[in-house]
Amino acid sequence: MDPLLRIDRALETALARAAGRGCPNGLAAALRYAVFPGGARLRPRLCLAVARACGEDDPILAEAAASAVELLHCASLVHDDLPCFDDAATRRGKPSLHRAMGERLAVLAGDALIVLAFEVLGEAGARRPNRLAPLLAALAGAVGAPAGIVAGQAWECEPRLDRVEYHRQKTGALFAGAAMLGALAGGAEAEPWRAFGERLGLAYQVADDIRDVAADPTELGKPTGRDAALGRASAVRELGLDGALLRLEELVAGAVAAIPPCPGAADLRALVEHEARRFLPKSLVRAAA
Amino acid sequence: MDPLLRIDRALETALARAAGRGCPNGLAAALRYAVFPGGARLRPRLCLAVARACGEDDPILAEAAASAVELLHCASLVHDDLPCFDDAATRRGKPSLHRAMGERLAVLAGDALIVLAFEVLGEAGARRPNRLAPLLAALAGAVGAPAGIVAGQAWECEPRLDRVEYHRQKTGALFAGAAMLGALAGGAEAEPWRAFGERLGLAYQVADDIRDVAADPTELGKPTGRDAALGRASAVRELGLDGALLRLEELVAGAVAAIPPCPGAADLRALVEHEARRFLPKSLVRAAA
């Protein structure tokens, strides 16, 4: 089955559980709004691709891991968009959650999505009790303190931002986590997959910086030019557009080189190279072709 | 060892992990501010007391379960205090986290505490893999959607508040969760302990309503009279002070009656009756004596 369908089906199941008996209507609607329609679902697709490359002996566990990763990504988008952070008006081509349903439901939906991610993983992990603790550790490490997404976002509150840690935590950590959870769900060790995921995350961050200056806002589903407007660090501001494109190419090559030995290494390599082209704005891909 | 010392030691260990390598200073400080000094630590003490009543064959797992419960309670206080909800100026006798460190760190500290709770449980759960999935299910059920604390708080966003669900979810759920996690950590079944925890949670809610009208703000560590000021449902508004005191007595008796058969049932019963008196403002206890 197509990975996107597998992911969306697993997310539907998770949301149906969260919207079960007793759930206030507003919260149920907010959870759905935060998760559907999705973006590119890059992180859960990465998770499934690594699980498959490792032999994927338990597809249900892999789908649970992938959806846990995506639920946490959605939670981070909802909270990052809040008025006290980016105050983003749009996200994934529609009004941000707090603009659509109010700040209170945006705070609560983010909280509930974090909990749901661990719940989904725990339920599927009951099938493989010995994999559950490492899966939880990889997921929590990717998201919490000291070095997950939340910590990355907290660098924005520091008087001096450590740019390397900032990008590693805010973007690299969940890519690394997605790869590591995929490996664990597929019956392999997690740690050898960290570098692969981290490099992909850094590549994605550079691609995101490029899209912020070069993409069409309609294609992107959110406003462009935000990095410059908010004075944020950006690979394009630092290296120029050509320099950033070169850096992206290096990072993707580095990620591919970091794929550990596994049954599906060749397919995974081809997939990464294919996907890397999709990271970029269509106009740049057309120009390069 | 004194339960409070066990809990605080486990919380210290958890916070030290969260403030580890790479953690931005502000986030590390905010996490500590949210957790120390504590309130009465009622929920984790309930968790430890139930684990002990069930025979507690694994004290480290019981302490992890108790600290996970408290971390989630602290997270909910920080987010409930945010300007978009109660905009509370003080909490536990000091400025609320967002007043002290800003709204952004308050949002992020709450998020990181939720993640940390699951991480702490996962790490200790590696010792007893077959208990981990049920522990996770009980914890997530107490906190997330459809019927945990977050759902309870979301009733405040509904046009019509379902008061029974509101209190059951916002307060009862985590007390039930604390009891159920204690049972699971102690090697027993969770479900028989749900009613005991829920009734204690409802009793606590009534006691909290009583304290909101009858306590000294210094004793309480937060402002009094908030229910009336915010037009919130309250047992005192509904039943009067005497009626609320009677209701509290009934709920405590109902909780004691719901203690399932277990090796330490008699001690647990005595503890609950002792603690129930501590729920109340000192002035009322003195008046009743």
Image (cartoon, coloured by chain):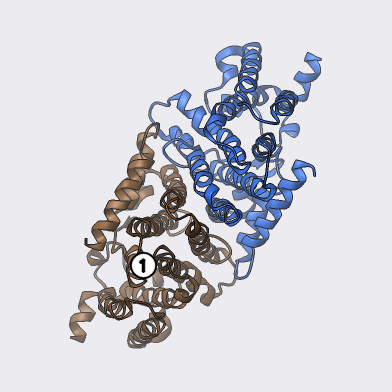
Chain colours: A brown, B blue
Residue tagged 1: A51
Give the residue type at disc 1: Ala
The image quadrant where one finds the C terminus of chain A is bottom left
Query: Would residue A227 appear left or right of A280 to someone viewing this image?
Result: right
Q: Residue at x 52, y 23 (%)?
A: B233
Q: Residue at x 33, y 59 (%)?
A: A59
Query: Would residue B154 appear left or right of B241 to someone viewing this image?
Result: left
In the rendered image, residue A185, in percent from the top left (x then y), is placed at 41, 62
Q: Residue at x 31, y 52 (%)?
A: A10
Q: Residue at x 59, y 57 (%)?
A: B123
In the rendered image, residue B48, in percent from the top left (x then y), is placed at 68, 40
Splitting the image into 4 quarters, where does residue A266 fall?
A: bottom left
Determine crowd level at label 1: few under 14, some 14-19, many 20+ residues with C-alpha closer than 10 A.
many
Is residue B37 visible in the rendered image? The answer is: no
Is residue A142 visible in the rendered image? The answer is: yes
Splitting the image into 4 quarters, where does residue B122 fall?
A: bottom right
The image quadrant where one finds the N terminus of chain A is bottom left
Q: Chain letter for mark 1, please.
A: A
Instruction: Report the number of numbered marks.
Output: 1
Reply above or below: A255 against A8.
below
Query: Would residue B284 appear left or right of A147 to someone viewing this image?
Result: right
